[in-house]
Amino acid sequence: MSKLKSEAFFITRVGTPEEAFELRELDIDAPSEGRVLVEVEAFGLNYADVMARRGLYREAPSFPCVVGYEVVGKIIDCGSASDEHLIGKRVLAFCRFGGYARHVVTESHAVVEVQQQPAQELLALSTQGVTAYYMAEYLTPIHQSDIVLIHAAAGGVGTLLIQLAKNSGATVIAKIGDEKKRALVEQLGADFIVNYNTSDYVAQVNSFLNGRRLDVSFNPVAGSTYKKDMQLLGSGGRMILFGGSELSKGKWGIFSKLNFVRKMGLILPIGLMMRSKNVLGVNMLKIADNKPEVLTHCLAAVIQKYANGTLHPQVGGAYNATELNKAHTLLESGKSTGKLSIFWD
């Protein structure tokens, strides 16, 4: 197949969605060996996309670029004879950027065949579902006696973490910033809910712990929350950092970045050892690059949990492609719950 004429939403500059995004034509090369070409039905939004649009995500390609980590669609071409059985199959697929397009080429090991389940539910199981599963069941499994703090508990990763933690028998403390999100995390099984916009969340957590300590913190915020969570962790406690959303609130460029780092302080390995505390960093892009078999395993496991009814993805909104700016603004505001998806037609 020669080059395919497609189109995609490019980030052309740092700014608001209206300033940054531009719908442009895109030439797609035929897939090489071990790769497949997907005709995209819908793609998902992730907070990393917001960070990229604001120029704060160092892993993102140079502008102009097409971001996006996951799509649902149909495979229409493949680069290897061994993958020809996939042609015509509807799949959930990971991609290393490029998801905000009508067509995307990705690795054949990064796709999983799906049936006619709603695309907006499937997309919640990709980047966010795999991230949650990797942290909670693969990297450092949650145990029945654990007390777990989940930041951004009403978001795409957070809602899945609540379910995984409760399925493991843990006690869950859900951190939210809007009372409108309380009902959702309660429904998912959270044992205690803290609203960080009403008072200091550390004081609220300590009131619930009543002398006990946290076992796990799932933290996509970092910055000032790092030291606070370290104070809450007990012996054997694990802090899992998988984002830096506090950085996105900075308005002063390099000075905001320096202040973000300053708030986290100096991490000394000897101090962690003496206190028997653990800090684990998670970047699923690196896992995809260097441990693709782990990504494949986690994706299959998440789809299986969805199929057998033990994992229920939360849909925050399904938008038409003409509403991309609206969806991005909502995601950036922190007021969304669950997964936001964009449909081409």
Image: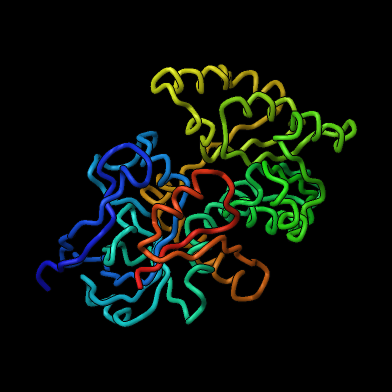
Identify which residue, 332 or 19, lies in the foreground. Answer: 19
- Is the image coloured rainbow, by chain, by secondary structure, or in one colour? rainbow
Q: Residue furthest right?
A: 210
* Vertical order, 319 against 69 (above or below): below
Q: Quadrant of residue 110?
A: bottom left
Q: For the point 47% across and 46% down, which residue is it? A: 47
Q: Nearer the viewer, residue 8 or 117?
A: 8
Q: Residue at x 49, y 44 (%)?
A: 332
* Residue at the image point whose x is 79% and y is 56% from the top: 169
Q: In the shown orientation, is residue 66 left or right of residue 120?
A: left
The spot of residue 254 in percent (x, y) is 39, 20
Vertical order, 339 against 260 (above or below): below
Q: Quadrant of the N terminus?
A: bottom left
Q: Is residue 92 left or right of residue 193?
A: left
Residue 166: name its quadrant. Answer: bottom right
Which residue in the rendered view is the most extreme toward the left?
Answer: 2
* Left or right of 211 in this view: 111: left
Question: Observer-nearest residue: 289 or 334?
Answer: 334
Percent from the top left, x then y, of residue 82? 27, 76
